[in-house]
Image (cartoon, rainbow, N blue to C red):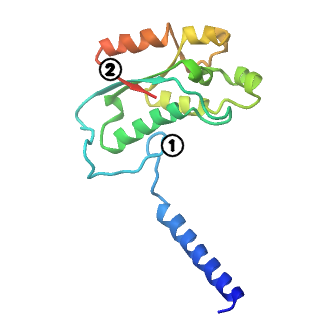
Amino acid sequence: MNKRTMFLAAALSLSALTCHAQSSTEGFWTTPTIAGYGKMHALPKAAYQPQAEKQYKIVFALTQGAKTPSAVNPGLDHVARTVNLYVASGVPIDHLKFVAVAYGAATPLALNDTQYRAKFGVANPNLPLIAALKAHGIDVSVCGQAVAEHHFKYDWLDKQVTLALSGLTTVTTLESGGYVLMPL
């Protein structure tokens, strides 16, 4: 084979592999309950499946910021993934008692769109996800102490977000009520 023929054969092989890889992942990731957020892959025969008849109480401690202001907060996206995993496993949505509390670097996710745009120059990408979580009974809250530490005003918070006294008291109060802590 000459060099041109070898190059074309290699390019065609690579193209075929790429097409196969793309087609084999179609439908692999789904977002069955929180549409467009919290990608998950169903594994119905995997160990440690949630039990449909049980209630699950989780407080998510969101402490990390997004990589860029235009990206959804990864911890908040993991809350959506958790909802998707439980519901896809057969747990009714009303059996999920989930509270996400943002503090530290995650605090800005709670800003309304006007204030987020003023600070970061882009729309708040977290607000559609917060709305979707709220629509399914998931409370998204923010630490009031972190709001003050960031020099944000309380009326800058989006109306969908619950203002909590603090992340510390939210976590400990909910844990004393039977919630499990999931740090994200």
Q: What secondary structure is found at the residue carrying circle 1?
A: loop
Q: Is residue 153 left or right of residue 48?
A: right
Q: Residue at x 48, y 61 (%)?
A: 25
The residue wearing badge 2 is: 179
- Tell whether 33 sits left or right of 143: left
Q: Is residue 98 left or right of residue 68?
A: left
Horizontal and vertical percent position of residue 2: 69, 91
Kindly indicate the quadrant of the structure image that contains residue 182.
top left
- Residue under numbered circle 1: 35
Please state which of residues 181 and 84 is positioned toward the viewer in this rendering: 181
> Which of the 4 quarters of the picture holds residue 49?
top left
Q: What residue lies at 44% left-to-right and 39% top-to-bottom?
A: 81
- Give the class, few, some or many, for how many residues have Cα within 10 Å of label 1's Cα (few <14, many ≥20): some
Residue 58 in percent (x, y) is at 36, 25
As drawn, 29 above or below 10: above
> Percent from the top left, x then y, of residue 172?
37, 11
Quick check: 173 above or below 116? above
The residue type indicated by label 1 comes to Ala
Residue drawn at (30%, 38%) of the image: 91
Q: Callout 2: few (<14), some (14-19), or many (20+) C-alpha neighbours within 10 Å?
A: some
Residue 19's quadrant in the figure? bottom right
